Image (cartoon, grey):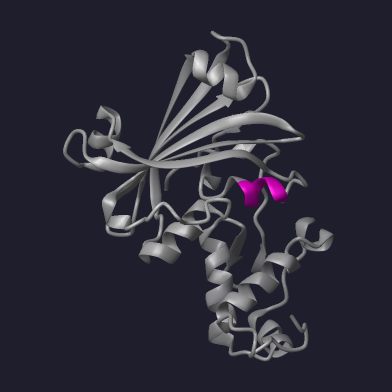
Amino acid sequence: MNVNGLGRKSGLPLKKQAEIYLRKLIGEKKYQDGELLPDEVSLASRLGISRHTIRAAIGILVYEGLLERKAGIGTRVKKMNSESAILSWRSLSREMSKKGITVQTFDINIEMIKASDIAAKALQVAPSTPLYRLDRIRGWNDMPILRSRSWFHPRLKLTGDEDFSQPLYDVIKNVSGLYANRADEEFLAVSADKELSVLLHVKTGSPLLLRRHIVFDKSNRPMELAEIHYVSDRFSLTLALKHGE
């Protein structure tokens, strides 16, 4: 990508190229340290695109929780805690990369299987409806940290051939056109069963944190049930609460 102008022959839409450029830009130390990004006019001029296009690209990163915009001030990288913040459920890999951690995926498996009772209730489908279920073992420094299990609503029209090494909600958006808009969260203290003890390299009965969330699209329809088991002594979650006005 040419910094002095986006590649109009690259095959990627200009908005997507601008988004890629911004992701690289916000990784620079000065922006990680709180310096304001260049304004929209400057960025549009630098990249040779319209202000509308750069604003749309910035909006995507604001939506993902990577940037924050304040009227009359500007746009900067959104500060996150060193732990995993609850607001960042959209992309573990993007969040951890901001902390200098590369997320590894040790195993991916997707199959069509009858919905569990919990999945059927969460996704508002009939019991035992065949659904795609995605299991991933993920971690870093060659150590498994979590097993995520996602059940998907049939309206997403997944085929099972998607590249789930990519950020999950990007995959869903590209296939179905649906955006993950919000999630209802539940947290439980559980112990590792035999299967999870093998997958996560812990002893059977070891304490795990189960994070269960139902993800909804912009029309408030359930699209995914995720059940994520974390090894509790290798990972921590934080919840930031704000007083309502």
Residue 91 included in the magenta stretch of the image: no
The residue positioned 23% from the left and 34% from the top of the image is: 121
Q: In this figure, what is the number of numbered marks?
A: 0
The kind of secondary structure the magenta stretch mainly shows is helix
Q: Specify the quadrant of the image occupied by residue 208.
A: top right
In the rendered image, the residue lying farthest to the top is 205
The answer, for residue 73, to whether it is visible in the render is no
Looking at the image, residue 160 sits to the left or right of residue 3; the answer is left
Q: Specify the quadrant of the image occupied by residue 240.
A: top right
Residue 95 included in the magenta stretch of the image: yes
The residue positioned 69% from the left and 73% from the top of the image is: 21
- Region in magenta: 93-97
The residue positioned 77% from the left and 35% from the top of the image is: 141
Looking at the image, residue 29 sits to the left or right of residue 65; the answer is right
- Considering depth in this image, is 64 or 157 the residue closer to the camera? 157
Percent of width and height locating residue 229: 52, 27
The residue positioned 29% from the left and 30% from the top of the image is: 116
Percent of width and height locating residue 177: 37, 66
Percent of width and height locating residue 87: 52, 45
Looking at the image, residue 93 sits to the left or right of residue 2; the answer is left
The answer, for residue 10, to whether it is visible in the render is yes
Position of 92 relative to 148 (above/below): below
Percent of width and height locating residue 64: 54, 57
Position of 152 relative to 231 (above/below): below
Q: Quadrant of the N terminus?
A: bottom right
Position of 111 relative to 199 (above/below): below
- Considering depth in this image, is 126 or 212 the residue closer to the camera? 126
In the rendered image, the residue lying farthest to the left is 126
